[in-house]
Image (tube, rainbow, N blue to C red):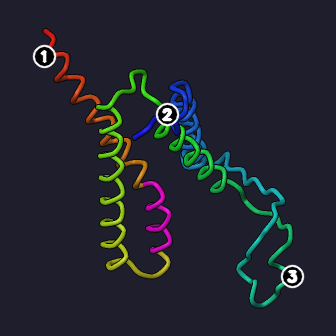
Amino acid sequence: MGTTLLFHNRFKKIGWILILISIGFQLYPMIFKKYLITRYVYVPVLFSNYMFKNFRETFSIHPHDIDLTVFLTLSILGCLLVIFSKEKIEDELVSNIRLTSLIWSVLISYMLFLILTMTIYGTTYLLVCIFNIYTIPLVYLIRFNFLLYKNSFYTRTDEQ
């Protein structure tokens, strides 16, 4: 797996910062409910809930609470920066760990998604779809960092 598509190592720190900001952005209203502020911003709407009833609602500008949009955008950008950033030492072992972690994360994500698709119905299924956005990066990050830690532990004990 070539490293030409990977970002520089410093983008990993930026990615972790974006992930932490997005988590804080979501936890703040839960912790401080009395300071809850809705942020309505006028955004372009490509498709609306009423697109079949009123076609003029489809391609227009409407006020929208952007909390979830900002959270999803920051967390997805952060995950992409963390996952696709080079390690300090990028060699064949790290490339192999990247590839196996990616394969594991896709397999686990889709197996979990199939099981949840067969067992959850109704509007709760929307939460499953949102959760599924994060399973591939989450499983990848856990497996990749665990294998890096495990291999660095073995190389340290072999050198001593």
Q: From the viewer's perspective, tell me whether residue 91 is left or right of residue 3.
A: left
Residue 49: say if magenta.
Answer: no
Q: Is residue 24 left or right of residue 65?
A: left
The residue at the far bottom in this view is 53
What's the residue type where badge 1 is placed? Asp
Residue 144 location (% of width, % of height): 33, 39
- Distance from disc 1 to disc 2, alpha carbons, whole Å, reads 28 Å
Q: Is residue 11 above or below residue 73?
A: above
Which quadrant of the figure contains the N terminus?
Answer: top left
Within-10-Å neighbours for mark 2: few <14, some 14–19, many 20+: some
Q: Which residue is labeled 3 in the image?
A: 56
> Magenta region, mostly helix, strand or loop?
helix
Q: Nearer the viewer, mark 2 or mark 3?
A: 2
Read off the residue under disc 1.
158
x then y, percent, for residue 21: 58, 37
- Dot 1: element: helix
123, above or below 11, in the image = below
Mark 1 or mark 3: which comes first in sequence? 3
Q: Which range is magenta?
A: 125-134
The residue identified by callout 2 is 85
Find residue 28 and report its image quarter.
Answer: top right
CA separation, marks 1 and 3? 68 Å
Front-lying residue, 66 or 79: 79
Which residue is at a point 52% across and 39% down the rendered structure image?
A: 5
Checking the image for residue 75, the label placed there is: none
Name above or below for residue 18 compared with residue 29.
above
Per the image, is 130 magenta? yes
- Check disc 2 and give the amino acid type: Ser
Indicate the position of residue 92 as horizontal and vertical percent values. Answer: 32, 31
At a point 50% along the width and 43% down the height, the residue shown is: 79
Q: Which mark is first along the chain, 2 or 1?
A: 2
Q: Nearer the viewer, mark 1 or mark 3?
A: 1
